[in-house]
Image (spheres, coloured by chain):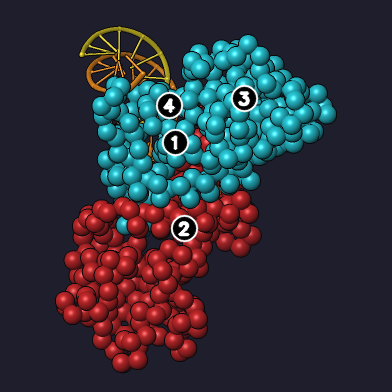
Chain colours: A cyan, B red, C yellow, D orange
Amino acid sequence: MSQSIYGQYCPVARAAEVLAERWTPLVVRELLCGSRRFSELQRGLPLMSKSVLMQRLRSLESNGVVTSCVQTSGRGRSYELTPAGADLAPIIELFGRWGHRWVRKPVTRGELDAGLLLWDMGRNTKAAALPQRRTVVRIDLTGVPREPRGRRSYWILLDRGDSHVCFEPPAPEADLEVEAELAALTDYWLGHTTLAREIVAGRIRLRGPRELVRAFPSWFGVAGHTARRTRWTKKPPTA
Amino acid sequence: MSQSIYGQYCPVARAAEVLAERWTPLVVRELLCGSRRFSELQRGLPLMSKSVLMQRLRSLESNGVVTSCVQTSGRGRSYELTPAGADLAPIIELFGRWGHRWVRKPVTRGELDAGLLLWDMGRNTKAAALPQRRTVVRIDLTGVPREPRGRRSYWILLDRGDSHVCFEPPAPEADLEVEAELAALTDYWLGHTTLAREIVAGRIRLRGPRELVRAFPSWFGVAGHTARRTRWTKKPPTA
DNA sequence: CAGTATCCGATGCGATACTG
DNA sequence: CAGTATCGCATCGGATACTG
């Protein structure tokens, strides 16, 4: 966005010149959530085109919100928020609160996105609350639209406070199995319903040792605010 | 902005669909500052075209942020924030704080706008702090670019907690005269300098009874947050 | 004044292709 | 993978004109 389009010296206008642009708050949200690499950002913003993501990163960089540095190990750059960028956290959080409170559009079927949901779940685990021993959770989804990324089974590997999402089983047997309608799991994730209600309604089923079933909901934080990195791969990590 | 462009159910995205658009935060700011009529909004957003303002108002209305009702007295509509809109206040305030803190672009000469400054000053008077008796302040500006609205003299009429800005003298004699370089008064208004420093530097001069000179800075609140209506006319009100 | 309607140029953006 | 470059369409938005 070019400089001073609003012709106003008001500080609100100054901030709006940086932030009030398509996609920009979401890029900041991704960075606040801990994404660092280009591919991670893309993962969290599946509908954003590569060129626009690049452009936004550059524009944020020129506005002092983001810095990037070339990686010595591996290729590409690592993007990070500057102090000014980190200071946007309360704004993004208020965005989230406001959206949660006031935007009363139900999630449409077309918006359901299994990959995005799992990506979000993976990065919102609470390290302190996770089980001590390595635990494999298998998520089986029904009602997944085939269009965007129609994968139906995911594994979340929890290990000493770390979480890792993958598309192939890290172990022959999962410790906990979650069978859920994508719509129900999404609604639960957004706080629109409770786990108990969905279980009673038969839209979510948990199978496994009683203590894991009971602990499951405590592993995840409030969507969008835990700010940690997840690993996300096709294949599980080699144990 | 059309629905669900981001394809994300995340609440931040929901809010961004409403807010992250050119001009929109500034329209909300204007409404939070107490503007109700179309013309008032235009006054506070001089560079925004009529068509875009209309479109934004409609879009905000369809998103449940604004309501409008046709005026029985007078013509046109009155626009107001809904509870959802009023709940944007903390976000806009954070925008302002962030912009003030982090956007380090000095006000360029081309951005100076005497009308906008006076509009802002007029609506940011603190009712409780104003003098008891009717007081006329004359503002004479130098260094006003002629392009946007090159008026050089303004009068602010303070009367029992009310303020009114006009372009013609409400009384033959002003109680307080302010002579200022537009750039200096703007910088003072934005908190980039102090009144004392500008007076010493000869860029701002106050002339009038000692108690009014002393009281002057106390009449105005922090730019952008007092949220009251001003009257703004060419001719002064008939006493 | 408070809009509504229309037009046309600028730009934003998605798609695609190319590179180390 | 992490970009860069190009292209062409669609939308946005500013200007202007028209209306009660």
Residue designated by label 1: A34
Q: Find numbered disc 1 in the image and state the secondary structure of the residue it sits on.
A: loop
Which chain does tag 3 point to?
A
Judge the density around disc 2: few (<14), some (14-19), many (≥20) Cα neighbours within 10 Å: some
The Cα–Cα distance between marks 2 and 1, rounded to whole angstroms, is: 26 Å
Please state which of residues B109 and A33 is positioned toward the viewer in this rendering.
A33
Task: Kindly report which numbered mark, 3 or 1, lies closer to the viewer in this rendering.
Answer: 3
- Return the disc, 4 or 1, that comes first in the chain's sequence: 1
Same chain assignment for discs 3 and 1: yes
Task: Report x, y in % for residue B186.
Answer: 28, 66
Same chain assignment for discs 4 and 1: yes
Q: Quadrant of the N terminus of chain A?
A: top left
The Cα–Cα distance between marks 3 and 1, rounded to whole angstroms, is: 23 Å
Q: Residue at x 57, y 23 (%)?
A: A157
User: Looking at the picture, which amino acid does disc 4 mark?
Assistant: Glu
The Cα–Cα distance between marks 4 and 1, rounded to whole angstroms, is: 9 Å
The Cα–Cα distance between marks 4 and 2, rounded to whole angstroms, is: 31 Å
Task: Report x, y in % for residue C11.
Answer: 31, 31
The part of the image, by quadrant, that contains residue D13 is top left
Which chain does tag 4 point to?
A
Residue A40 - label: 4
Can the viewer see residue A215?
yes
Q: Find numbered disc 3 in the image and state the secondary structure of the residue it sits on.
A: strand
User: Looking at the picture, which amino acid does disc 1 mark?
Assistant: Gly
Which chain does tag 2 point to?
B
Relative placement, left or right, of A103 versus A213 is left
Q: Residue at x 40, y 47 (%)?
A: A86
Residue designated by label 3: A135
Q: Residue at x 28, y 66 (%)?
A: B192
* CB within 8 Å, label 2 to label 3: no
The Cα–Cα distance between marks 4 and 3, rounded to whole angstroms, is: 24 Å
Task: Kindly report which numbered mark, 2 or 1, lies closer to the viewer in this rendering.
Answer: 1
